[in-house]
Amino acid sequence: MNKININNFDFLRVVFAFTVAFAHLIELSDLEILKPFKVFFNTRLAIDGFFIVSGFLIAKSYENSTTIKDYIIRRAKRIIPAYAVVILISALFLSAISTYSLSEYFSNIQFWKYLTANLSFQNYLEPCLPGVFETNKFCAVNGALWTIKLEEAFYLLVPVFYWLVRVKKFNFYALIIIVYLLSVTYYTYFLSIDNYRIAKQLPGALAFFGTGIVFYKNFSLLQKWKDYIIIPCLIIFFLEHYILKTQLLKPVAFGFMVFYVAYSFRFLNNFGKYGDFTYGIYIYHFPLIQLFVYLGLFNKYPPILICMLFLMLTLLLAILSWYLIEIPYLSKNRRLRQKKLWS
């Protein structure tokens, strides 16, 4: 494998996934013992980190694809199977705890709206199932899935971006700068009017995804100078994130921090040796927390013990998802690379 494939992205994605999981655990469980730790689990940074890694790896995937059809099929196979399974499993098995009878549950229009909305990546249209989690803080079955539609949109935007550059002869960097500026302007405006829910959506997230693409295209240069660039990026990130509360250069600064960790610390290179469990952790943790809250496990038993049980079950579901659902749909090259890691 060449140098670009020897990285710590598997490690970073697991860190980001567990950061989101812990943050949701603190919020949904509402446990006083966990609240002091909330400051250490920033979901926004974790999701932005995902988008940076995604921009880097999706650009690589597109350039290594033989055709657009091949690229789209590979992306769909990576995302859709496990995603569809978690939606269907949730819809079927949570009927057991619904306040409705089985016949009322499955004939309820909300059930079919949930399936339609979630299977089409429009989770916000119907996040809840009939009679499920009504006593919880939120009734949403899987509030973490809102980012998946952004990932899908990114996948579709990449061919358009490359078409503009290769066919219409747009300058690569001019196009990236335009997208970047539009993205940070959109995010800053909606944040200024206290509408974070809109600010975090697709245009606002594009700056991070675009940063990942630029870093992929300039991999050799950044790899050569990374030890000199990291300090200025740390300073810029600290100023913008903690003091100024702005997002002008933060996507670039944070993006380089992610890149630096990905291509330093060689002892983490084989972190994904036994599989990429990130996606499973991300898509299964939220409904599991909701179920634990509904059953009152955090109140009936020692909270730390239940938190450990939650983490073990989340990881177990992620491992099962990887081996039983995700691996069979991976591209041949991806499966070969996984075998090399195993060996």
Image (tube, rainbow, N blue to C red):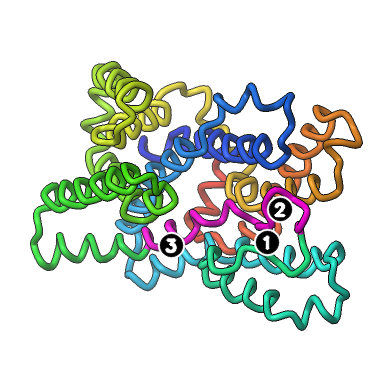
Disc 3 marks a residue whose amino acid type is Glu
User: Label 3 neighbourhood size at 10 Å, few (<14), some (14-19), many (20+)?
Assistant: some
Indicate the position of residue 124 as horizontal and vertical percent values. 53, 63
Is tag 3's residue or tag 2's residue first in the polypeptide sequence?
Answer: 3
Distance between mark 1 and mark 3 Cα atoms: 17 Å
The residue at 26%/44% (across/down) is 184
Image quarter of residue 255: top left
Q: Nearer the viewer, residue 266 or 187?
A: 187
User: Quick one: quadrant of the N terminus?
Assistant: top left
Q: Which residues are magenta?
A: 133-155
- Tell me the SS state at disc 1: helix
Q: Which mark is residue 152?
A: 3
The residue at 76%/57% (across/down) is 133
Badge 1 vs badge 3, beta-carbon distance below 8 Å: no
Disc 1 marks a residue whose amino acid type is Val
Badge 3 vs badge 2, beta-carbon distance below 8 Å: no
Q: Which residue is mark 2?
A: 287
* Left or right placement of residue 76 versus residue 62 in this view: right
> Does the magenta segment cover residue 301?
no
Q: Which residue is mark 1?
A: 86
Distance between mark 1 and mark 2 Cα atoms: 9 Å
> Does the magenta segment cover residue 142?
yes
